[in-house]
Image (cartoon, coloured by chain):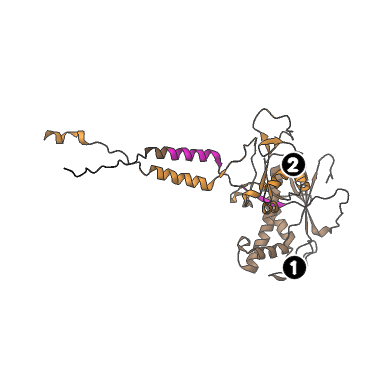
Chain colours: A orange, B brown
Amino acid sequence: MKRYFARRRHEMPALNTASLPDLIFTVLFFFMIVTHMRTVDPKVTYNVPQGSEVKKLGHKASIVNIYIGRPIQKAIPANATSYNGFYIQLSNQLATLDDIKDYLDHERSRMSEEDQARMTVSLKVDRDVPMGVVSDVKRVLQESFALKINYSANEQGMRNEK
Amino acid sequence: MFLRKKKRIPGLNTTATADISFMLLIFFLLASSMDTDKGLARQLPPPQDSLNVQELMVKQRNVLEIAIDATDQLTLGGEPITHNELTERIATFVANATNDVSMPEKSRREVFLLGAVDVSDRHVLSIEVDRATSYDAYFQMQNAIVRAYARLRNQLAHQRFGRAYADCSREEREAIGMVYPQRISERVTTAEEGGEP
């Protein structure tokens, strides 16, 4: 009888973790849906400008990215050229202005006919890049008939409107 | 005595499922990126032969001269201006609601869905950018221009169709785009040389 009053019986029940996998799966699915896979390794850092009129880009398959920014790694490959300290990145490597045409042709040939018609070049350009570089890139785009472009930017609040 | 004892099947041990799904979760967090692609969509003009560029004569009243110099100073017709003022000026310039003689000419056209309307198809926004201008300054100017057009188009959409431009059907948007087409010409110059197209 004395045993009943002993406090030893108050054992903490084990936490039921049966639903933990379900919870984590939910989070997992959430992330799978809202994110998209990184296809390129950034070789340059770029800080895109902010604008109030930015719109979401449609149709991922028809978008070609061109990055212009400051290089991340110290060792710059020999075939890359500096434009006032900024570098152009195409797919996974630093490149020069002359490479853009071939790159666009290559990307275009990979697309379906539908996507070719609506191919958009997304320019992810650092805000400090001088316009001379950007306009040179734009001229190359014109010459290779990639006329739909998109200045990549972040959405800005209504702060500047007032 | 001969009754079989009921064998109890032990429950599947699912303790590790959480770990497995954590692994998957972390993999997806690392391999994917959250940033949604957003930006200002623009259309470039087709390439021109530098040999036979046609000099297009445009009347003075139809041109609005916007320039950014090497120090990122935005000017409109030679005078410094802020981005918000620029939006206002472009909107009044393109719309020319009062048919001012110093503002662009309009032509009366038959537009699908809208009937006969005054179309502002003669105006030109002439942009001159220095090679040393920062991309940010250029982008803010583009943003101001897009905002001006968006405002005009939105106004017209509300007036004629009773809803925002973004909510209009494709035909309606095309009709509005006919009334306020974006006519922009860009030039890039160097401070030293000047006038290089």
Badge 2 marks a residue whose secondary structure is helix
Q: Residue at x 78, y 47 (%)?
A: A143
Q: Who is closer to the viewer here, B76 or B172?
A: B172
Kindly tell me whether residue A35 is visible in this rendering: yes
Kindly tell me whether residue B71 is visible in this rendering: no
What's the chain of the residue with tag 2? Answer: A
Badge 1 marks a residue whose secondary structure is strand
Q: Residue at x 88, y 51 (%)?
A: B52
Residue found farthest to the front: B2
Q: Residue at x 53, y 38 (%)?
A: B30
Q: Residue at x 55, y 39 (%)?
A: B31
When the figure is inspected, residue A162 is found, relative to residue B192, above or below; the finding is: below
Percent x, y of residue A132: 76, 41
Q: Who is closer to the viewer here, A115 or B140?
A: A115
What is the magenta range? B20-48
Report the amino acid beneath label 1: Asp
Residue that label 1 marks = B118
Label 1 vs label 2, nearer the camera? 2
Residue that label 2 marks = A102
Find out whether residue A140 is within the magenta segment. no
Find out whether residue B39 is within the magenta segment. yes
